[in-house]
Amino acid sequence: MKPDMANCHPANFRVVLDVGHTVKVPGAMSARGIPEYSFNLALAQDVKQALLDAGFTGTVLLITDKAPPRGLFARAALANSLHADLFISIHHDSVPDNLLQTWQYEGQEQHYNDNYPGYALFVSEDNGDVKGSLMFGRLLGNALEARGVQYTPHYTLALMGHRRRELLDATAGVYRYDQLIVLRTTRMPAVLLEAGSIVNRTEELDLETPERRARTSAAIVAAVQEFCAARAGLTVIKANAPSGARVLRTSAGSRTH
């Protein structure tokens, strides 16, 4: 039974959107040589706007230039200090190096793997609210599937080696990844979304489009709304919390809001 959406008061529900990686440590490289960070930032900005449009005016976009692992602990610490209700880390996927193949694109050697398109969701059982994390992960996976975006099952395969993960929900595509710093050190429900594979040459092109970002954004908004309504009875209204959507940037020496 779905919760009564009228129970959700979006202005009182704070979502922190974590833009995965940094400009200098940009994550995976796409099949056409575009850094993952560019995909992460574009999607997170669209998600933020979609949440604002839905009334979640306390949404915070978290951007940092601190390198890991220090920067990862800083992200979680900032989310904790904001007393966020939900933490979503935005990423895009690749595969282990031994599964990559080589091709030429615009005269440059690039790397790809066309076998494993789709999203994946990760939660940590060391998180401060693992029950809430799994609940939101399931809601988001179901919302993505309802919009025609399917999850990738390849994290269950032996060929993934040390990156192989336990599949907690085979319908919603939610995996267990206890060691992820931004998930295990946050005190609120936290999920990491791999929005799709940028080393898959077909999916990469789709992930670049406003249409795909809009589908993912709509799924996130729908999941946040349902999660907010379900948790309404447990949510403490933060009378002293600052309101208004923000972009929060962190650096090695300073913090600006």
Image (tube, grey):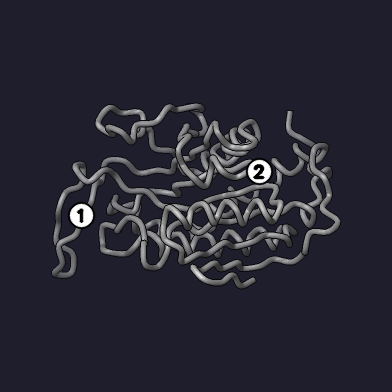
Residue to which mark 2 is pinned: 188
Label 2 element class: loop
Amino acid tagged 1: His
Q: Is residue 173 visible?
A: no
> Where, by quadrant of the figure, is residue 217 drawn?
bottom right
Which residue, as the protein is rendered here, is positioned at the far right?
239
User: At x 54% / y 38%, what residue is drawn?
Assistant: 141
- As measured in the structure, the alpha-carbon distance from the residue carrying label 1 to the one carrying label 2 is 37 Å
Q: Position of residue 76 (x, y in %)?
A: 57, 51
Which mark is first along the chain, 2 or 1? 1
Viewer-nearest of discs 1 and 2: 2
Q: Is residue 13 visible?
A: yes
| Numbered mark located on residue 98 in the image | none
Residue to which mark 1 is pinned: 111
Q: Position of residue 115 (x, y in %)?
A: 27, 41
* Quadrant placement of the N terminus: top right
> Where, by quadrant of the figure, is residue 30 drawn?
bottom left
User: At x 32% / y 55%, what residue is drawn?
Assistant: 28
Decide: is 105 above or below 256.
above
User: At x 49% / y 43%, what residue is drawn?
Assistant: 148
> Where, by quadrant of the figure, is residue 239 drawn?
bottom right
Q: Which is more toward the observer, 186 or 139?
A: 186
